[in-house]
Amino acid sequence: MKIPSSTKSLDRISKYINETPLRKSDRLSSSNQNVFLKLENLQKTGSFKARGALNKVYSSNLGGNEVVAASSGNHGSAVSYALSTKNLNGRIYVPNTAKKSKIEKIQSYGSEVICFGDDCLDAEYEAIKYSKENKCEFISPYNDLDVISGQGTLGVEIYNQLPDIDAVFVTVGGGGLISGVAHYLKSKNPLIKVFGCSPVNSSVMINSLEENEIINSESKETLSDGSAGGVEEGSITHQICKKYIDSTCLVSEGEIASQIIQAMDNDKIIIEGAAAVAIAAYLKMSEEVKDMKNIVIIVCGGNIGVNTLKSIL
C-alpha cells in the first residue's frame, strides 16, 4: 500500500487552498518548550478536509459522473467546495445528528444533502450503497489513498515552516489526517513523535489500534463531532495508524469544552471541538513531552455552531 506523494498533491491543489499559519502559542509554550498551533481553522471551508477532497477530485477523472460523499459536516463541505471549483455538484450523506450549521455550509457550495442514520458510519454505508447502485464516484472521508495524500499536504507545510519539529498532536476520527501527516513527517524524520488524540466518548480508531481489525465500539455524543462516529471496516487507515502513531490520549468532554473557551479567550481563535481535542491531549500529556523542544498541535477546524458555543459558554 503506497501513499501517493503529498508534495505532488500540494502542487496539485495549492491554488485552491490557504497555506495556513503556524503560530507559536504563548499560552501553551514555556521557557523550555515552544508549542505551535497549525491553524487549519483558517483553511478553505474552515477545516483541513479541503485538502483531501481537492486532491481526490483533481486526481480523478470524474467526467459527468455524480459524486457521492458521507460526512458529519466538514468532509461534506470540503467535497462540495472541491466540486464547485470544477462547476460540479455532489450528493452528500450526513447523519441525522449533523449540526444545522454544517449542513448549510455543504449546501452553500451547491451540493445536495441527504440525512440518514444516527451515526457517521450509517450515513457512510448508505452513501457507498447508493454509489454502487448508481455507478457514482464515492469520495471517502479517510479510506482513500488520494484523500490521505491530500491531508498529508498539511505535513508538508508544517515541515517547511518548522523543520526542527519533535512531536505533533493530531485528532483522530477515521484516521485520514493523522495517516497523511505522520507518513510525510516520518519520511522526513523518523524520530518525530506522533500523538493520536480522541474524545473518550468516540474513539473507535484509537480503541482498535491494539487489534488486527477495526472494532466499532459504541460512540456517545461529543463536542468533537468532526471526529465522531464509527470507522469503515477494513479501512486502510487502520494499518497506517498502527504503523505511525507513537502514543495516544483520550480526553473528556469537560477538557474539550475548556480548550474551546481557552482558545477563544487566550489564543484569540475560534475552534471546533475536534481541534480542542488535540490541545487538551497535549496538556494532559505535558509530563510525557516535557523534554521536547518544538511541538506542533494541529488545530484541525473552526466550524463550531453558535448554539454549541452558547451552550459551552
Image: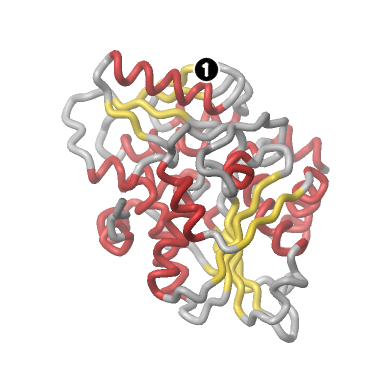
Q: Which secondary structure, mark 1?
A: strand
Q: Amino acid at mark 1?
A: Cys
- Identified at 54% across, 69% down, the residue is 22
Q: Position of residue 143 (x, y in %)?
A: 40, 40
Compared with 169, 308 (above or below) is above
Pick the residue in front: 257 or 292.
292
Q: Position of residue 134 (x, y in %)?
A: 27, 15
Q: Which residue is mark 1?
A: 115
- Identified at 35% across, 34% down, the residue is 139
Count of numbered labels shown in the rendering: 1
Q: Position of residue 41 (x, y in %)?
A: 56, 52
- Identified at 55% across, 31% down, the residue is 72
Among the 4 quarters of the image, the one containing residue 25? bottom right
How many other residues sit within 10 Å of disc 1, few (<14), some (14-19) or many (≥20)? some
- Identified at 43% across, 36% down, the residue is 234
Judge left or right: residue 197 versus residue 40.
Answer: right
